[in-house]
Image (spheres, grey):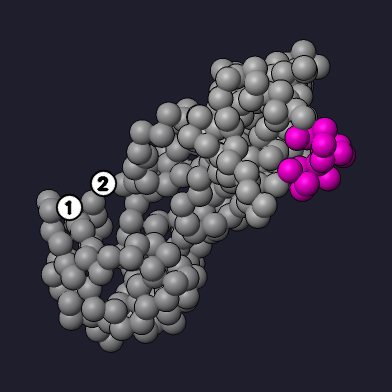
Amino acid sequence: MDRWQAMKIFVKVAETESFAASARELHMSPPAVTRAIAALEDVIGARLFVRTTRSVKLTEPGKRYLDDCKRILADIVEAEAAAAGSYAAPSGTLTITASVLFGQMYVLPIVHEFLKRYPKVNGRLLFLDRPVNLVDEGIDVAIRIGRLQDSGFSAIQVGTVRRVVCGSPDYFQEHGLPGTPADLKNHRIAASTAAWVSPEWRFANDQRVTIHNWLQSNSNEAAIATAVAGLALTRVLHYQVAPALREDKLRIVLAEHEDPPLPIHVLYTEGRQAPAKVRAFVDLAVSMLRTNVG
């Protein structure tokens, strides 16, 4: 029996929970799939599936074996790719994720430059304002803002970004300037749940203020637009309002009360050795981000 082929068949049956569906996807006959699984069970000495007329489910030994098979098959693919030279020159599809606005402002230009340099690479972008599981969603590189949990991935810090409270000159002329975080209770607030869900805003020296939203949105852009219109204050990341600040459409207040800035990391999975496409993109991203946002 071809053990490698039998493992591929086993993984496919586990994923589809169907011998017939697996046979179709693998371009095999159903009896051939059944024989391969039976032979594998004989070699291992354990039953891998519980089969009924309506379902195919993994046994406990089957669940453990599935994890091992996926790892072994991934190692084989990695070894073959290395032998074929994919670690010598960037090629294939590279998947990158970042938050929506940061991705559009800072990551997209990096991707454009990368694809121009390496025409054998195809890019896939996921700009989302939600946590993304790198393994489950097939992500090669993520640009993350905020404190990192210990994920086991490789991470390179490229800069920091401030959380700022800001409003328009017209708003301050009508409503005055807040002198302390506690004064925010007397101001209109446009808050974005895309930034943080909690109504409690934290500042330096453990100052905490529970905000009563005048307008709440799931969009940073909506909160910023409300502030630019002179209707309320908002709190967002500095890069998100940098254009409005340069044009004096918004001004920062309470800067002396800001909590420590948030780190920005380039995060990537690597296995034993990151493919050339990942290493090349990480090198370029680190260089460009440190120049632009560091």
Q: Quadrant of the C terminus?
A: top left
Q: Is residue 33 visible?
A: yes
For the residue carrying disc 2, how many other residues have a C-alpha within 10 Å: few (<14), some (14-19), or many (20+)? few
- The kind of residue on which mark 2 rests is Pro
The span shown in magenta is 19-34
Using the image as rendered, state which of residue 48 and residue 219 is in the foreground.
48
Tell me the residue at 35%/73% (across/down): 191
Q: Is residue 25 visible?
A: no
- Residue at the disc numbered 1: 204
Tell me the residue at 17%/77% (across/down): 185
Looking at the image, do the residues carrying marks 2 and 1 touch, with CB atoms under 8 Å apart? yes
Tell me the residue at 67%/23% (across/down): 40
What is the count of numbered marks?
A: 2
The reply to whether the magenta stretch includes residue 22 is: yes
Using the image as rendered, state which of residue 35 and residue 259 is in the foreground.
35
Question: Regarding mark 1 in the picture, which secondary structure is present there?
Answer: helix
Q: If you read the primary sequence from the N terminus, does the residue marked by circle 2 or circle 1 appear first?
A: 1
Q: Residue furthest top?
A: 83
Q: Position of residue 46 (x, y in %)?
A: 56, 25
The reply to whether the magenta stretch includes residue 202 is: no
- Residue at the disc numbered 2: 260
- Main secondary structure found in the magenta portion: helix
Tell me the residue at 77%/13% (across/down): 83
- Note whether 196 is above or below 99 in the view shown: below
Q: Position of residue 168 (x, y in %)?
A: 37, 75
Q: Position of residue 154 (x, y in %)?
A: 47, 28
Q: Is residue 35 left or right of residue 230?
A: right
